[in-house]
Image (cartoon, rainbow, N blue to C red):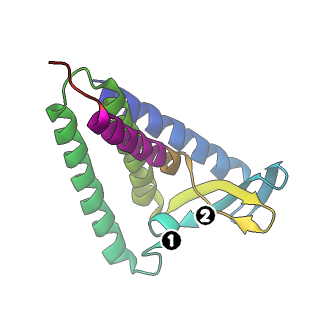
Amino acid sequence: MMLIGISMLVVALDQFTKFLILQTMKLNETQSLISDFIYLTYIQNPGTAFGFMANMETFVRIPFFVAITTAACFIVYTYQRLIPQEKQFTRVALGLVLGGALGNFVDRILYGKVIDFIDMRYHDFQWYIFNVADSCITVGLIFLLIEFIWGANRKTEP
């Protein structure tokens, strides 16, 4: 139940923020939130992270993303059923990853592209523009890595 709840919360937050961007900004428009650090820049990314596969034809790209998202959902759902009930941190992490994947999947189905808008910069350095779904996937994967490392180093009681 936690997996579905967190996932749906992430999808709702992701889609709400994208709706706001679509209603208030023009494509490629930039607005400063914190000068020299955080901006809102509305772009559409037809590819994956870092623009990978952006130049691939739509008739190949969309079925690929449907297959990858379906596989990811199946893997996350199966994995969460196999972990012990007390591993709530892991369940939260999986919910973040699943919700992020589904949030971007909704964009791909609706627009054929992912709406990105969080633009982080520091002087001349600019990171890739991303969205709430991407953030949740990243945080979820970091949580899983922490759990994996921390869990591997934890000694079991006799």
Q: Residues within 10 Å of mark 2 (few under 14, many from 20)?
A: few
146 in magenta? yes
Most common secondary structure along the magenta stretch: helix
Residue at 78% x, 68% y is: 124
Could you say which is closer to the camera, residue 50 or residue 146? 146
Say whether marks 2 and 1 touch (CB < 8 Å).
yes
Q: Residues within 10 Å of mark 1 (few under 14, many from 20)?
A: few
Amino acid of disc 1: Gly
18 in magenta? no
| Residue where numbered disc 2 is placed | 128
Image: 17 above or below 84: below
Counting residues from the start of the chain, the first of labels 2 and 1 encountered is 1
**Residues in magenta, as a range:** 136-153
57 horizontally vs 35: left or right: left
- Residue 89, picture quadrant: top left
Residue 41 position within the rendered picture, expressed as x and y whole percent measured from the top left: 70, 58
